[in-house]
Image (cartoon, rainbow, N blue to C red):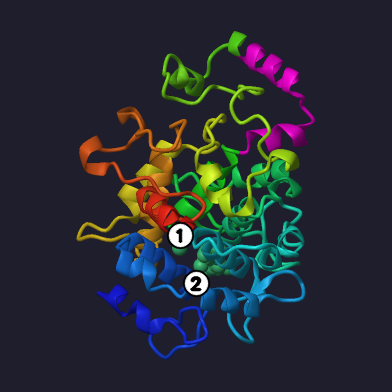
Amino acid sequence: MCCLRLPSSQDKDGGYGGGPGQMPHLATTYAAVNSLITLGKPEALSSINREKLYTFLLRMKDASGGFRMHDGGEVDVRACYTAISVANILNIVDDELIHGVGNYILSCQTYEGGIAGEPGSEAHGGYTFCGLAAMILINEVNRLDLLGLIDWVVFRQGVEGGFQGRTNKLVDGCYSFWQGAVVFLIQRLNLVVHEQLGLSNDLSTESADDSSESELSDEEEHLEGTSSHVQETFPLGQEGAGQDNASDSPKIADTGHEFINRPIAMRPLFDSMYLQQYVLLCSQIEVGGFRDKPGKGRDYYHTCYCLSGLSIAQYSWTDEADSPPLPRDVFGPYSKCLLEQVHPLFNVELDRYYEARKYFSGL
Ligand SMILES: CC(C)=CCC/C(C)=C/CC/C(C)=C/COP(=O)(O)OP(=O)(O)O
Ligand SMILES: [Zn+2]
């Protein structure tokens, strides 16, 4: 099993390469850390040299505020996310690491509303997830134009049910996670969205009342009488009050934990059942594994991100972490198809995330 080789992929100066002897790289460091957390045993967690990893992360930091993927490598939003993700989950994040990251990511949000890999490039689902997740982790998500981002992402689900990565491109199973998770994260950002809409809490409550008087759509009926499901619109001034407000912001080390415990107050902005159908019926290969689309071969990357996207879709109607979806929100036989929930900011199984947090917060 490749994970047994991970300690030897750890560079003597910190970080992980793709294999033993290879140069440390942020993408493989992120993959190695998440793999060790998924293994979850103390031997796996204690094998990570956090002090050296921190110095590797600082070495990757660029004057622009962003991070580069490896020594002499490219600076992009993916590097910002992978650096901040491992720093947060390993409890080694500090002000020096996050300094300027928000400015860099902000400079990558495009006229379309999504986020590009670098300033001046095209908005893309992979980088949009990275940028949004990193901004949440550093407590600066209110600086993004979330209304523009919503406008962009809601049009990325194709008639096939899957998501495309960018405008006018084909759908692909891996974007089930990259784009699906963007929506899943936005569902927990209702207060920032409301602020950017210029709605006060009172107005929001009024709009909730108004909509309850209007004729119910199919989705609204879906929500009727389901106490374990999200409200039709935001119950502001109740749960989540003060979130994303500088004075009440969680400490940077706690952002990943605080975020998952936010109640969802916004229904999904994509068709979750249709996405599940794309993943299971179009991306899945009968002999096992997942692919981009019919006609393509399976690979580990698409298997990982199709499954993570499927989990995101299955849990998109639940209103709190750890509560299981209703059978009607899961496509296919419940006992056979229901997946574990993933943490939407780190893409590791939620239970393993909690174990890792317990372990690393005690160090
Ligand atoms: C954490 C981590 C490693 C993040 C990676 C994020 C990610 C998936 C970035 C996308 C990269 C990219 C430009 C793909 C376009 O490929 P394409 O032109 O073949 O595909 P497209 O037609 O779907 O755009
Ligand atoms: Zn893909």
Residue at left 25%, top 36%? 334
Left or right, 85 with reference to 343: right
Separation of marks 1 and 2 at Cα, in angstroms: 10 Å
User: For numbered disc 2, what is the local secondary structure?
Assistant: helix
Q: In the rendering, at what x and y percent does residue 42 appear?
A: 32, 64
Q: In the rendering, at what x and y percent does residue 290 appear?
A: 32, 60
* In the image, residue 88 above or below residue 70: above
| 225 in the magenta segment | no
Magenta part of the chain: 189-211
Residue at left 55%, top 57%? 165
Kind of residue sitting beneath label 1: Phe
Tell me where residue 206 sits by quadrant: top right
Frontmost residue, 195 versus 162: 195
**Mark 1 — residue?**
360
Kind of residue sitting beneath label 2: Arg
**Residue farthest toward the right in the current orientation of the protein:** 198
**Residue farthest toward the front in the current orientation of the protein:** 362
Image quadrant where one finds the N terminus? bottom left
**Mark 2 — residue?**
50
Mark 2 crowdedness (10 Å alpha carbons): few <14, some 14-19, many ≥20: some
Q: In the rendering, at what x and y percent does residue 212 appear?
A: 59, 12
Type of secondary structure dominating the magenta stretch: helix
Residue at left 69%, top 36%? 193
Mark 1 crowdedness (10 Å alpha carbons): few <14, some 14-19, many ≥20: some
Q: In the rendering, at what x and y percent does residue 281 appear?
A: 31, 48
Is there a contact, CB below 8 Å, between mark 1 and mark 2?
yes
User: For numbered disc 1, what is the local secondary structure?
Assistant: helix
Residue at left 36%, top 48%? 351
Tell me where residue 131 sits by quadrant: bottom right
* In the image, residue 363 above or below residue 258: below
